[in-house]
């Protein structure tokens, strides 16, 4: 059973507009959420994160919103640029039964920003 | 230096071959990971080393054998692989503080093809 879901496999957005990528999770033990960006033939790169004690975190053009009651988070990219075209993975971690955190990845959303 | 370096970038091997994947980081991170990623799928955790000790083995077949010679190096020894093991193998590292704020730094991966 997928604990981290990204229900949109792909998204196309015009350059300069807002991109909104969504993520849902099922495990209430998760307390930290991360977004990673991946270009073809490269490893994922950390983009932005948010702790469960916050509902918003902003870093330049990237903002992540967290709605704990809905177990939902979203990544907003404003304005979108062609270089943002990549696969975006939502990931979650939390104190599980062991002393370490396991980072669980969602299936990814492929974003295409059209010039 | 914020790089995780993986070698080789590409590897083609037969089912009877023995090969090794190598990973190196010099960020002082004390946790290192192996992930496997199939096309259009999220990275799947295989192994975690925490302070040079194997702390997670996600029920990976014994034809994959991890090794952590020191805190900067991580190897994955491959023997008698199957064609379905063909995938992108990603190495990652993190500080190992297990406080939730555990950002993973990924290498570019080794694209493995098993014939």
Image (cartoon, coloured by chain):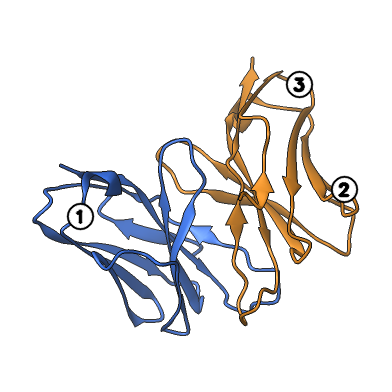
Chain colours: A orange, B blue
Q: Nearer the viewer, mark 1 or mark 3?
A: 1
Cα–Cα span, label 3 and label 2: 29 Å
Query: Residue A12 appears at what percent x and percent y?
Result: 66, 20
Quarter of the image for residue A17 reads top right
Q: Nearer the viewer, residue B63 or A81?
A: B63
Query: How far across and down, in percent of the image, does residue B113 sit?
Result: 23, 43
Helix, strand or loop for disc 1 = loop
Q: Are marks 1 and 2 in contact (CB under 8 Å)?
A: no
Q: Tell me how far mark 1 sits from mark 2, CA to CA.
A: 42 Å
For label 2, the crowd category at 10 Å Cα-Cα, with few meaning under 14, some 14 to 19 and many 20 or more, is: few
**Numbered badge on residue B81:** 1
Image point 42% across, 37% down: which residue? Answer: B39
- Name the element at disc 3: loop
Q: Earlier in the sequence, mark 3 or mark 2?
A: 3
Q: Nearer the viewer, residue A94 or A49?
A: A94
Whether the residues at callouts 3 and 2 have beta carbons within 8 Å, the answer is: no
> Label 3, on which residue?
A16
Q: Chain of mark 1?
A: B
The label nearer to you, 3 versus 2, is 2
Are discs 3 and 2 both within one chain? yes
Asked whether the beta carbons under mark 1 and mark 3 sit within 8 Å of each other, the answer is no
Name the chain letter of the residue that bears numbered label 3.
Answer: A
């Amino acid at each position: 059973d997928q604990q981290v879901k990204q229900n949109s496999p792909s998204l196309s957005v015009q350059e300069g507009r807002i991109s909104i990528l969504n993520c849902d999770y099922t495990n209430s033990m998760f307390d930290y959420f991360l977004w990673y960006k991946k270009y073809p033939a490269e490893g994922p790169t950390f983009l932005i994160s948010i702790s469960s004690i916050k509902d918003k975190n902003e870093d330049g053009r990237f903002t992540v919103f967290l709605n704990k009651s809905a177990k939902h988070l979203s990544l907003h990219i404003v304005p979108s640029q062609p270089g943002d075209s990549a696969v975006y993975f939502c990931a979650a971690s939390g104190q599980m039964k062991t002393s370490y955190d396991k980072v669980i990845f969602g299936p990814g959303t492929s974003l295409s920003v059209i010039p | 230096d914020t790089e995780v370096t993986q070698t080789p970038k590409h590897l083609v091997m037969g089912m009877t071959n023995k090969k090794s994947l190598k990973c190196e980081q010099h960020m002082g991170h004390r946790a290192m990971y192996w992930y496997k990623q199939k096309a259009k799928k999220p990275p799947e955790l295989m192994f975690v080393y925490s302070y040079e000790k194997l702390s997670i083995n996600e029920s990976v077949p014994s034809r994959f054998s991890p090794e952590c010679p020191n805190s900067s190096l991580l190897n994955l020894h491959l023997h008698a692989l199957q064609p379905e093991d063909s995938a992108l193998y990603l190495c990652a590292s993190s500080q190992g503080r297990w406080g939730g704020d555990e950002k993973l730094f990924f290498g570019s991966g080794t694209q493995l093809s098993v014939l």
